[in-house]
Amino acid sequence: MRQVMVAGNWKMNGSSESVKELIAGIKDGMASVTKAEVVVCPPAVYIPRVSGVADGSAIKVGSQNICDEDKGAFTGEISADMLKDIGCEYAIVGHSERRALYGESDELVAKRFAAARRNGIKPIFCIGETLEERESGVTNDVCSRQIDAVIALEGVEALTDGVIAYEPVWAIGTGKVATPEQAQDVHAFIRGKIAALNADVAEGLRILYGGSMNAGNAKDLIGQTDIDGGLIGGASLKAEDFLAICQAAE
Ligand code: 13P
C-alpha cells in the first residue's frame, strides 16, 4: 500500500511572521490527519523557522530546489547537506517554474535528483507538459523524456527513493485543473512505463498530481487508482485550505 502524500509548495511567498502563523496553523490541525504524509516546502530562508515550529509533529519539511553539486563555488545554490542540517527530508526538483523561467534542462534536473538521493534527501521530482504540448498530443512523450533523464543517470531503482509529481504546466496557478480522468491517464502511463522496467519500483512509487488542486477537487483526483496524493501551490498557503486537502486525501 502506498501512503498518500500531501505536499505544499509555498513558492516565493511569505514573511517571517506569516510562515510562523501558517506552520503553526497546520500543526494545530494535524490531529485530524492520521493517514496522509504531510510535507511543506517553504522558501529556503524560512526553512529553519518552519522546521522549528513543525518539530514534534508529523509534518515533514522540504526545500523547493537543491544543488546538483555537494560543496564549493556554486554561488546562490544550497547543498543537500545544508538542507539536511536545517531539517529537510525532501527536496522538490525540476519544478516547471525552474525549467521554464531558469532554464533547468532535463539533464540538470536529473543531476539535482541524484544529488538529493546520494545525500539522503528524498526528491519530489516534477514533470509535466505545457498546453501546447498537450494540444499537439505529446503529453506522454514529454513526461517520458523527463523521466528518462533520471533513469539514464541513476537507473530505474533510484525512483524508489523519491516521489514523482505530475504537474501539467497549463494547470499550475491557472485554476484550470486536469479532470480526474485526464490526470489518471497520465499517471497510469507513467506507472506503466516504469513497470515495464521494474514492476516492484512501479508498484511502490508514489505519483502525486499538482496543478490547481484544492479542497473541492482533491478527493476526486486522489481517489484515482494511480494518484497517490498532491503537490499543492496556492491552496497550501492557508492552513485551513491545506488541512482540508489533507483530510480529503484520507
Ligand atoms: P497551484 O496549486 O497553485 O496550481 O500550483 C501547483 C504547483 O506548482 C505545485 O508545485
Image (cartoon, grey):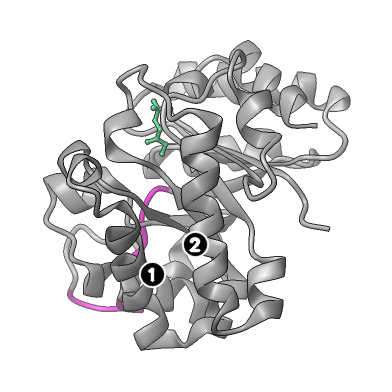
Q: Name the residue under label 1.
A: 147
Residue type for callout 2: Ile
Q: Most prominent secondary structure in the magenta stretch?
A: loop
In which quadrant of this rendering is ligand 1 seen? top left
Q: Looking at the picture, does residue 65 appear above or below residue 15? A: below
Q: Nearer the viewer, residue 202 or 29?
A: 202
Q: Which residue is drawn at 13% across and 51% down?
A: 102
Q: Which of 133 and 161 is in front in this view?
A: 133
Helix, strand, or loop for circle 1?
Answer: helix
Q: Looking at the picture, does residue 157 appear above or below residue 189? A: below
Q: Looking at the picture, does residue 201 appear above or below residue 221? A: below
Residue type for callout 1: Ile
Q: How would you rate the neighbour count of disc 1 (Cα within 10 Å): few for under 14, some for 14-19, many for 20 or more?
A: many
Question: Looking at the picture, how far across and down is residue 192, in whole percent?
Answer: 56, 67
Q: Mark 2 points at which residue?
A: 190
In-image side of 30 versus 42 (left or right): right
Q: Which residue is drawn at 67% across and 79% down?
A: 199
Disc on the earlier residue, 2 or 1: 1
From the Cβ of disc 1, is ligand 1 less than 8 Å away? Answer: no
Q: Which mark is residue 212?
A: none
- The residues colored magenta run 64-73
Question: Looking at the picture, how far across and down is residue 77, in whole percent?
Answer: 26, 61
Quarter of the view holding residue 37: top right
The answer to whether residue 123 shows anywhere in this view is no
Screen quadrant of the C terminus: top right
On whether residue 111 falls in the magenta region, the answer is no
Q: How would you rate the neighbour count of disc 2 (Cα within 10 Å): few for under 14, some for 14-19, many for 20 or more?
A: many
